[in-house]
Amino acid sequence: MSGIDNQNEKLFNILEFKGISRRNFIKYCAAAAAAFGLEYYFGGLFAEAAASAIHKKPIIWIQGQGCTGCTCSLLSTMNPGPGEVLLDHVSMRFNTTIMNSAGDLSADVLKETVNKGGYLLVVEGSIPTADPRYCFVEGMPFDELLHKTAGNAVAVIAAGTCSAFGGIPRAGFTGAKSVEELVDYKPVVNIPGCPPNPNWMVGTLLYYLHFNELPPLDDLNRPQAYFGNHFVHDTCPRVAFFERGQFLTDWNDPATVDWCLLKMGCKGPVTHADCNRIWFNDGVNSCIRSGAPCAGCVEPQFYKDLSPLYVSPLIPGGPQVGSITLQPNGIAPASAALGAGIVAAPFVVYKLAELLKKNKEGESEHGE
Amino acid sequence: MANKIVIDPVTRIEGHLKIEVEVENGIVSDARLVGTMFRGLEQLVEGKDPRDVPYVVERACGV
């Protein structure tokens, strides 16, 4: 009992030092629990799990063909938040971006942690397979390091679209592969995003610390709570303009600056993420709210098959998302669904958009 | 008698870096910096919509 209390004190002392109150930390944990559809009191349980994990549940964070953007998104918040403290102080054993030691010293830390086992492995960046020389870490090809560290890990978290699905490097010629394609002998959780929201990462970690198992995953191994149940479109701040059929077609027109970005290439209606529900950078903003159309960065098709990013999928010859063919003809399914009052499926959303476009726009067809 | 110092990886930077320094009688005689990761971002955006390029190449460094 006193052991747990000591651990709790340790965590809360660190938090206090960083200017985060006990109350705020438990609130943060409760929010993470709520995302998974758990009862309110799980917040306290999550906080306790975090406290008892201090220096006990190690994390190894390795990086392949990445840009460190995921590390930055996850660790550097404006005010050091509970998430940063949790990742930084509670568990992070090896992360070359933030660790103090370099060279042989850091290699020793890695070796020691790998030998002990029982850690979570976080991988950022894709793995080049065309030629091992495209990425060398610690004097060995990155795929060798990945297999070496994944062997003793309890689970592998692929943080960011590069490691989850190949992301931007997959569009190049380095033969960039995702973690799942190489590591088939360990459970892999994909937390895609370019970069991912820190809450997705920390929430998954808290869930794992408390239940000692991975959260429910969707068919692409993404946490159901953050990806499977949502479309970016669902909570879009511009959704009212979408429903009224008001689409931005000229970036320079101040009168339409807040209008729906669908025609400027927004992939929100087919992208599974809760970006507009829990904003990025400590709740400062999200892509669409700041005026950028959703690029669909959490989907496996990103970036290669979602390019060009600023061309609407409504236009014939525009990008296709998964098995959904986004063509502006064949509006029959949409009208049928409208009759039934169902507008949830992305296919129907697009058809609905097409109907609205035809109704509202009439003769003027400029911009795209 | 050359003494070689190798620091790999260099930490607290973006990406991957390796430093090799050769010291001879207390004086640095040779030094190399090696960036050990390549994605081919320039080739990747060839033939793409020009409006995509800022989005893609800003991923060169996420710090």
Image (cartoon, coloured by chain):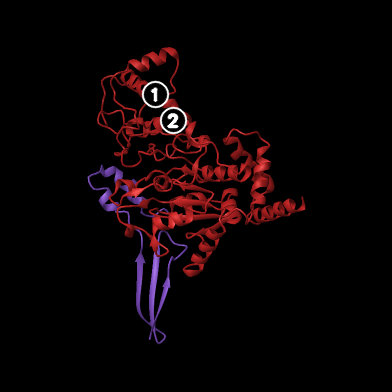
Query: Who's purple, chain-wise?
Result: B
A218 on left or right of A315 = right
> Which residue shows up at 29% across the image and 23% down it?
A328
Mark 2–mark 1 distance (CA, rounded to whole Å): 9 Å
Is A80 above or below relative to A107?
Answer: above
- Which residue is tagged 2? A233
Chain A: its colour in the image is red
Mark 2 touching mark 1, by CB under 8 A?
A: yes
B13 on left or right of A364 = right
- Residue A208: numbered disc: none
Residue B30, located in which quarter of the rendered image?
A: bottom left
> Which residue shows up at 40% across the image and 30% down it?
A269
Which chain is disc 2 placed on? A
- Which residue is tagged 1? A349
A338 on left or right of A332 = right
Q: Can residue A111 be seen here?
A: yes
- The C terminus of chain A lies in which quarter of the figure? top left
- Residue A160, percent across and down? 44, 46
- Which residue extends farthest top? A339
Mark count? 2
Q: Can residue A76 be seen here?
A: no
